[in-house]
Image (spheres, rainbow, N blue to C red):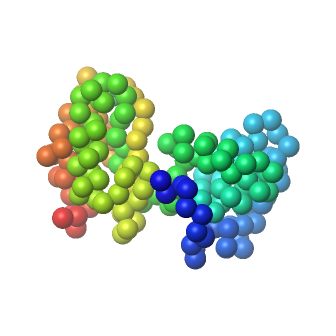
């Protein structure tokens, strides 16, 4: 998965002095707290917008904890992303009703037409795919949430049109 790569890209926040200052400040302010890891990662996600693999290594070193611990938290909670979110977010509900109702097939279709997996953003920066837990609309399973809008009973063959609505250039 993307989170295991540790190549530092040109635009990584750890190589940008301004972002690095923000990262250091967040760590220094919270490092002594109980449950510091979660607090620090939450703040990084909201202030920087994502937690890149290089950031995970940097934070682990500065906090004196194993990288695997940071990586474990970042990959467990779908709230965290390892790269910038796209202009639009498409979330697939992985709750039981949606799972049984066919969301895996919709995810397959999404991967096919967009070339990315949940947790990743399309190359043009337009669309981020994510998974989420039950959004409380089980009777409409399977459910996809696009930005703020909930779409129920989504079938794989209907999914491309939903994407076209937010991204008309998408083939
Ligand atoms: S399981 Fe998907 S809305 Fe409840």
Closer-to-camera residue (109/126): 109
Most extreme residue toward the right, as rendered? 32
In this rendering, the answer to whether 166 lies above or below 132 is below
The quarter of the displayed image where residue 94 is located = top left
Rendered residue at 60%/43% (across/down): 72
Quadrant of the rendering where the C terminus is positioned:
bottom left
The quarter of the displayed image where residue 144 is located = top left
Rendered residue at 72%/56% (across/down): 59
Residue 75 showing in the rendered view = yes
Rendered residue at 23%/49% (across/down): 109
| x, y percent for residue 53 | 59, 59
Residue 70 in the figure: left or right of residue 151: right
Closer-to-camera residue (16/101): 101
Residue 141 showing in the rendered view = no
In this rendering, the answer to whether 16 lies above or below 158 is below
Residue 102 in the figure: left or right of residue 17: left
Q: In which quarter of the image is ligand 1?
A: top left
Residue 30 in the figure: left or right of residue 109: right
């Amino acid at each position: 998965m993307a989170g295991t790569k540790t190549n530092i890209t040109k635009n990584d926040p750890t190589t940008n002095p301004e972002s690095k200052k923000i990262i250091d400040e967040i760590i220094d302010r919270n490092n002594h707290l109980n449950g510091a890891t979660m607090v620090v990662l939450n703040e990084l996600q909201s202030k920087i917008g994502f937690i890149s693999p290089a950031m995970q290594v940097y934070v682990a070193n500065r906090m004196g904890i194993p990288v695997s611990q940071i990586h474990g938290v970042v990959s467990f909670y779908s709230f965290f992303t390892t790269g910038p979110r796209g202009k639009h977010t498409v979330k697939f509900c992985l709750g039981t009703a949606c799972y049984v109702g066919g969301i895996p097939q919709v995810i397959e279709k999404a991967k096919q037409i967009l070339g990315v997996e949940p947790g990743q953003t399309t190359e043009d920066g337009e669309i981020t795919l994510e998974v989420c837990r039950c959004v409380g609309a089980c009777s409409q399973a399977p459910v996809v949430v696009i930005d703020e809008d909930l779409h129920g009973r989504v079938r794989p063959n209907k999914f491309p049109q939903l994407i076209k609505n937010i991204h008309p250039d998408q083939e």
